Image (cartoon, helix red, strand yellow):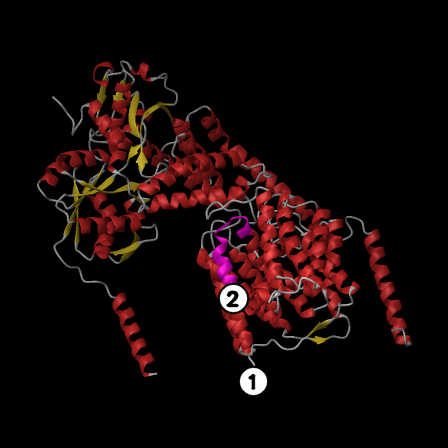
């Protein structure tokens, strides 16, 4: 290295280019580069979108929550049917159904609904999420799974019970954590 | 090489034969379907399922629509090998004619179970079963487990005798009886109605009523929904095969009817089938005894 | 004959095995996802997401352990004068292999290290993966014995072996400076992590130990199949299993059974095939995902390309829905594993030296 003028020229150019980049980086303001700014905003936008989603869910499902809390469980289920017309396939619909069915003592249906909800939105078992419903899912698994498993033992050829048990194991696995 | 060609020929022939439809053999299997609303509707719902059963069982199958009131007598006369009806009919046929339980239909939030509710308009002054004294009530058809039996039983259990304490009660006529019951209270013709929870659910889903239109005064425990049964004369092997076809049915299963490929479960308005046990029907037995209804009716 | 107890290298291998096992469990205790204290494929998926190669908001984090592995390796290789820029052996084939290493791992849900971390935590669903990995390594060995060779690695001028370590230095800068274009999950498994400095130090330590010892999981399985207990790596592997099992027991992380296991599914055939793919490919390209990182740190540009392929794969498995979850394996995942197997079979046909 540095044996001839060409090498020296290259080294000097390298230093100049690096210095130039460093100066650019050091002096760059937030509005200097629209592309970079838009990337920077993406995280913020993502968070805002998420918060908006949480608020949207809370607002739309508040009548169901109110009915559920007042003990009008069947009316709450009917309200969910009604909401299903405007929000078809919403994971939160399955979650609320699972919650209400669990309160009604329909463990098998509750497990199926909760598993469907968690499959579509893992936030429901994520302690870091404002949508987290871990205690609900935990109680469905701890109360429901042993009962359904016992029933499956007495009806080993029941495909639907086998599916419910599988749903229960899925929820158990999600509650246990691990990589997604 | 010669062996390879031979094996390939056999495999291809096997695949080709497998693709052909199996010829139907033996006497037809007669399946009685309880009419919910009309013969046309029953046939439209259950023809695809019957054709599917025919395909899977390799036997000709015949769908026979039958009125609820006639079902027991026609079954007793040996008109059906298999029968599809509500869970009270299952109990009646089980007790009186040794019907074998095959599978229970799944539909709605409670799957293979359903419930009966006593409903009033949201703005009604009626707050409890006590308040029903002297009021006008409409029930569903008399043999409906969640349109009549469950609600009648709820009232008796609460110490309220509908026969003596209501002003009067009515039963609807013709088709769409459960919808008529719900609309009856909605439009104010009656103060209170005996509505199957499943009908409330479906009408809400379809936008015919709103969840805010009604208040539920009381609701029964959940009991098994519509049920397939087999006559005691049906061969055990066939009954088992029939059950397996039903339990294995998935929403993706299709069948061709009049040149159209239809989804079997969608066409029949069914979510699937479940294998319940006869003892799961015991709550209906208890209700029927308390309400003094068939098959335990005493005069 | 067992390896000599007086051989210092043997003890380095044992230290690497025990370190990987114990720290692999402890990292989960300190905050990494359950049974995923160390999972190179999961970490690669997280890092790809952090770099914007996929947009799964729950899987974006520049895992310091990965950076530590590479930098620990280059540090150690430099100190012991083992750093050597080399490459030129079927570079594109290695890049694509890197992609499929992650595909196979993502369908199983874990790299070979995590496979055994899962097993030593009592997760019996990992058994299918273990069988698959052994079968894959065995198939790879059969291929090597019959002349499959990706070509000779040669010393390269121009220090190309520095490029991948330099890239990881840049990732370290990103991790510490947290520029806005690097994504960090706030929810999901990527949001679960041990404290940064602990992860980095553990990575550096294990990277250095793995560089000195040449220890890796598929390498141990390979040597175990070839030489049995005479292989030092076999004992390293045994130490790894013992370390992980003991730590899981002591830390109360042992849960025996098939069901309800963290980050596991019940589709055993696909667990088997996923790990079969990883084992087979690892033998052909000379190491599992962990070993590729270590070799990249030693200046092996071919391994560096496999690492680049792994990062690319990390993005693809998330973007294309290839990665399995506890709910099971997707159709895309199943097809991708089969395409991966077709790729290995193709490599085996195209790179076979039939002159011998």
Give the residue number, with chain letter if any, for mark 2: C136
Relative to C43, residue B87 above or below: above
What residue range appears in magenta? C118-134
Could you tell me which quadrant the C terminus of chain C lies in?
bottom right
Q: In which quarter of the image is residue A45?
A: top right
Q: Position of residue C137 (x, y in %)?
A: 54, 67
The residue positioned 54% from the left and 78% from the top of the image is C350
Give the residue number, with chain letter if any, for mark 1: C356
Q: Is residue A16 left or right of residue B207?
A: right
Q: Which chain carries label 2?
A: C
Q: Residue furthest left?
A: B77
The residue positioned 52% from the left and 56% from the top of the image is C108
Name the magenta segment's main secondary structure. helix
Q: Does the magenta stretch include residue A173?
A: no
Foreground residue among B197 and B38: B197
Q: Does the magenta stretch include residue C125?
A: yes
SS class, disc 1: loop
Q: In which quarter of the image is residue B32?
A: top left
């Amino acid at each position: 290295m540095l044996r001839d003028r060409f090498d020296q020229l290259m080294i000097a150019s390298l230093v100049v280019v690096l210095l130039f980049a460093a100066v650019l980086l050091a002096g760059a303001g937030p509005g200097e580069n629209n592309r970079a700014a838009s990337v920077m905003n993406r995280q913020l936008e993502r968070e805002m979108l998420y918060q908006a989603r949480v608020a949207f869910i809370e607002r739309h499902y508040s009548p169901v929550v109110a009915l559920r809390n007042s003990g009008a469980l069947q009316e709450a289920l009917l309200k969910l049917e009604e909401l299903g017309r405007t929000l078809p396939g919403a994971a939160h619909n399955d979650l609320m159904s699972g919650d209400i069915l669990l309160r009604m003592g329909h463990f098998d249906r509750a497990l199926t609904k909760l598993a469907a909800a968690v499959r579509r939105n893992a936030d429901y078992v994520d302690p870091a999420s404002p949508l987290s419903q871990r205690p609900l899912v935990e109680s469905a698994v701890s109360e429901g799974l042993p009962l359904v498993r016992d029933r499956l033992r007495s009806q080993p050829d029941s495909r639907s019970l086998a599916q419910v048990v599988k749903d229960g194991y899925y929820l158990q696995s999600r509650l246990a954590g691990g990589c997604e | 090489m010669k062996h390879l060609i031979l094996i390939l020929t056999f495999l291809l022939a096997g695949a080709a034969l497998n693709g052909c439809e199996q010829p139907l053999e033996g006497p037809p299997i007669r399946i009685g379907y309880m009419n919910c609303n009309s013969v046309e509707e029953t046939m439209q719902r259950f023809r695809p399922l019957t054709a599917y059963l025919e395909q899977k069982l390799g036997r000709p199958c015949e769908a026979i629509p039958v009125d609820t009131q006639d079902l027991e007598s026609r079954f007793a006369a040996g008109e059906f090998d298999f029968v599809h009806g509500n869970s009270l009919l299952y109990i009646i046929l089980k007790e009186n004619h040794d019907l074998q339980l095959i599978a229970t239909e799944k539909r709605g939030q409670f799957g293979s179970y359903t419930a009966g509710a006593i409903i009033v308009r949201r703005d009604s002054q009626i707050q409890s079963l006590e308040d029903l004294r002297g009021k006008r009530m409409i029930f569903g058809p008399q043999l409906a487990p969640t349109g009549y039996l469950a609600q009648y039983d709820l009232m008796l259990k609460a110490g309220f005798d509908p026969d003596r304490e209501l002003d009067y009660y009515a039963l609807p006529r013709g088709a769409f009886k459960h919808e008529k019951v719900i609309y009856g209270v909605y439009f104010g013709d009656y103060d209170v109605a005996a509505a199957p929870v499943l009908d409330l659910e479906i009408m809400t889903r379809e936008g015919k009523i709103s969840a805010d239109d009604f208040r539920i005064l009381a609701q029964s425990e959940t009991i098994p929904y519509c049920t397939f049964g087999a006559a005691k004369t049906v061969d055990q092997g066939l009954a088992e095969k029939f059950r397996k076809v039903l339990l294995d049915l998935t929403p993706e299963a299709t069948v061709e009817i009049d040149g159209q490929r239809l989804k079997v479960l969608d066409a029949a308005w069914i979510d699937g089938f479940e294998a319940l046990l006869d003892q799961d029907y015991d709550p209906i037995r208890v209700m029927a005894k308390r309400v003094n209804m068939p098959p335990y009716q005493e005069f | 004959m067992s390896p000599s107890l007086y051989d210092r290298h043997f003890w380095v291998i044992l230290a690497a095995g025990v370190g990987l096992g114990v720290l692999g469990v402890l990292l989960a205790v300190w905050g990494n996802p359950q049974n995923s204290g160390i999972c190179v494929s999961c970490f690669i998926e997280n890092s790809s997401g952090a770099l914007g190669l996929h947009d799964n908001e729950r899987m974006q984090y520049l895992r310091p352990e990965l950076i530590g592995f590479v930098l620990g390796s280059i540090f150690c290789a430099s100190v012991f004068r083992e750093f050597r820029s080399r490459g030129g052996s079927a570079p594109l084939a290695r890049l694509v292999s890197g992609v499929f290493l992650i595909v196979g791992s993502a369908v199983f849900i874990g790299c070979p290290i995590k496979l055994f971390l899962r097993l030593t935590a009592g997760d019996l669903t990992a058994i299918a993966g273990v069988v698959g990995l052994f079968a894959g390594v065995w198939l790879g060995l059969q291929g090597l014995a019959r002349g499959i060779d990706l070509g000779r690695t040669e010393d390269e001028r121009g220090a190309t072996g520095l490029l991948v370590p330099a890239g990881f230095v840049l990732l370290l800068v990103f991790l510490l400076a947290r520029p806005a274009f690097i994504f960090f999950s706030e929810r999901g498994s990527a949001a679960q992590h041990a404290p940064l400095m602990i992860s980095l130090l553990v990575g550096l330590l294990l990277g250095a130990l793995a560089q000195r010892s040449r220890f890796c999981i598929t390498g141990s399985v390979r040597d175990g199949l070839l030489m049995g207990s005479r292989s030092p790596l076999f004992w390293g592997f045994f130490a790894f299993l013992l370390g992980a099992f003991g730590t899981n027991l002591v830390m109360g992380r042992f849960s025996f059974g098939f069901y309800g296991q963290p980050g596991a599914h019940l589709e055993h055939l696909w667990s088997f095939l996923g790990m079969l793919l990883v084992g087979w490919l690892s033998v052909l390209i000379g190491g599992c995902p962990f070993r590729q990182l270590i070799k990249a740190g030693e200046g092996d540009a071919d391994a560096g390309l496999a690492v680049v392929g792994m990062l690319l794969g990390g993005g693809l498995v998330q973007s294309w829905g290839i990665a399995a979850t506890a709910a099971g394996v997707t159709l895309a995942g199943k097809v991708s594993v089969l395409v991966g197997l077709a790729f290995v079979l193709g490599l085996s046909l195209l790179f076979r030296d039939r002159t011998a």
